[in-house]
């Protein structure tokens, strides 16, 4: 059984409530439930933190044991050398995802410290971005 972890960064605990015109009305919990139902032969874990260091720690914890990491580092994508270095340091492939098309938004969202070290990047498909990333590991 493949082991895939979804890691969400800051403010993504507010999905469903946060800026619904950009991020939609669905909570991540509801979306995650559907994903688990749909991919029964995958062992999933979900982790969310608003704290940069905790996200680095989690990447270290899972980064040599899992088959795939789906990472939405949210705002830290654009600011965190530490998260970029962590993705570079681990062995498990990371697919970077974003709900919104960051390139159609403010210029500060166009840079990613994760992308150079990611296996691939999927963005702009709403929550479906996560599912496309999962499929890339199967
Ligand atoms: C995001 C895009 C980021 O620019 C933003 O800071 C987020 C969410 C997305 O999924 O579209 O928090 O990663």
Image (cartoon, rainbow, N blue to C red):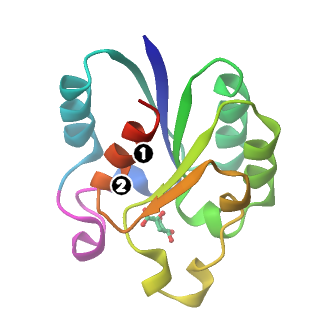
Q: State the residue in front, 92 or 73.
A: 92
Label annotation for residue 133: 1
**Residue 53 x, y percent position in the rendering:** 72, 44
For the point 73% across and 60% down, the residue is 116
- Disc 2 residue lies near ligand 1 with CB under 8 A: yes
**Quadrant hosting residue 109:** bottom right
Q: State the residue in front, 74 or 98.
A: 98
For the point 47% across and 55% down, the residue is 97
**Residue 31 x, y percent position in the rendering:** 22, 42
**Quadrant hosting residue 105:** bottom left
Q: Give above or below for 42 relative to 51.
A: above
Overall secondary structure of the magenta section: loop
Instruction: Give the magenta-colored segment's residue range.
Output: 15-25
**Residue 46 x, y percent position in the rendering:** 43, 31
Q: Does the stretch in magenta take in 22? A: yes
**Residue 37 x, y percent position in the rendering:** 18, 24
For the point 68% across and 57% down, the residue is 114
In the image, 54: left or right of 37?
Answer: right
**Quadrant hosting residue 29:** top left
The quadrant the N terminus occupies is: top left
Q: State the residue in front, 124 or 30.
A: 124
Residue farthest top in this picture = 1
In the image, 77: left or right of 74?
Answer: right
Q: State the residue in front, 14 or 56.
A: 56
For label 2, the crowd category at 10 Å Cα-Cα, with few meaning under 14, some 14 to 19 and many 20 or more, is many
Can you identify the residue that label 2 sits on? Answer: 129
Q: Does the stretch in magenta take in 66? A: no
The quadrant the C terminus occupies is: top left
Q: Are marks 1 and 2 in contact (CB under 8 Å)?
A: yes
Label annotation for residue 123: none
């Amino acid at each position: 059984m493949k082991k895939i972890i979804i890691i969400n960064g800051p403010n993504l605990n507010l999905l469903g409530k946060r800026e619904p015109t950009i991020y939609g009305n669905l909570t991540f919990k509801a979306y995650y439930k559907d994903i688990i139902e749909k991919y029964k032969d995958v062992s999933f874990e979900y982790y969310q933190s608003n704290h940069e260091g905790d996200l680095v720690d989690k990447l270290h914890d899972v980064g040599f044991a899992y088959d795939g990491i789906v990472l939405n580092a949210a705002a830290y994508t654009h600011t965190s050398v530490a998260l970029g270095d962590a993705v570079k340091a681990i062995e498990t492939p990371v697919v970077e995802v974003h709900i919104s098309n960051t390139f159609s938004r403010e210029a500060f969202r166009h840079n990613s410290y994760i992308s150079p070290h990611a296996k691939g990047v999927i963005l702009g498909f709403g929550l479906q971005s996560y599912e496309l990333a999962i499929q890339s590991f199967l």
